[in-house]
Image (cartoon, rainbow, N blue to C red):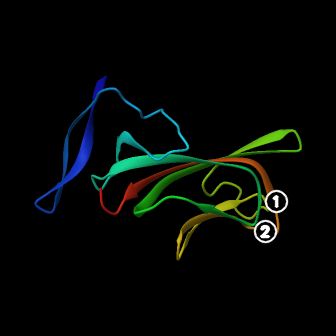
Amino acid sequence: MGSINKCEIIDGQKVLTPFVQTNSIEDYYSTEEEATNKVWIDGKRIYRKVIQAASFVGTLPVDINNVDDIVDVKFKRQYDKRTQYMDYGDGVGSSSNLLIVKTQNGYSIETVSSGETIYNLTAILEYTKATD
């Protein structure tokens, strides 16, 4: 347990207030949506969901709803007996780059190179919700 500050909006002003963590699930990862004990700069709670796929070509729909802002994305994929770790935006300009794309029906993970097959993908998404 420890004490950190969180940002809250009070009377239209951003105010830092003490935020005490207890029974933290900050480092808990699940394929189900989980509320973390993290708070984004706008004062909203951060949620986390892990997406896994054995393989996909081009586009992988992501089942997350009511998202206001995606605040962090990390990717891990394995191919040719190698493992590649990427924070969102790593590998810009390379054929291995993956993107999070907002669609009419929600979100998807897409490859920069159309038709590229991605194997053994794990994506960690952290986001705030429009309504909490």
* Residue 101 appears left or right of 12: right
Q: Amino acid at mark 2?
A: Ser
Counting from the top left corner in percent of width and height, residue 82 is at: 83, 40
Q: In the displayed structure, would residue 116 be above or below residue 82?
A: below
As helix, strand or loop, the secondary structure at mark 1 comes to: strand
The reply to whether dot 1 and dot 2 touch (C-beta < 8 Å) is no
Counting from the top left corner in percent of width and height, residue 77 is at: 74, 46
Residue 3 image-quadrant placement: top left
Counting from the top left corner in percent of width and height, residue 101 is at: 58, 68
Residue 57 image-quadrant placement: bottom right
Other-residue count near label 1 (Cα within 10 Å), few / some / many at <14 / 14–19 / ≥20 = some
* Residue 1 appears left or right of 81: left
Q: Residue, x 29% and y 27% (percent of image)?
A: 22
As helix, strand or loop, the secondary structure at mark 2 comes to: loop
* Residue 50 appears left or right of 45: right
Q: Amino acid at mark 1?
A: Thr
Other-residue count near label 2 (Cα within 10 Å), few / some / many at <14 / 14–19 / ≥20 = some
Furthest-left residue in this view: 11
Q: Which residue is mark 2?
A: 113
In the foreground, 100 or 63: 63
* Residue 72 appears left or right of 66: right
Looking at the rendered structure, the number of numbered marks drawn on it comes to: 2
Q: Which residue is mark 1?
A: 117
Counting from the top left corner in percent of width and height, residue 112 is at: 73, 67
Quadrant that contains the N terminus = top left
Q: Residue, x 53% and y 72% (percent of image)?
A: 105
Q: In the displayed structure, would residue 18 be above or below residue 89?
A: above
Question: How far apart, in angstroms, are the residues tagged by discs 1 and 2?
Answer: 9 Å
Q: Residue, x 62% and y 58% (percent of image)?
A: 89
In the foreground, 123 or 113: 123
Furthest-top residue in this view: 1
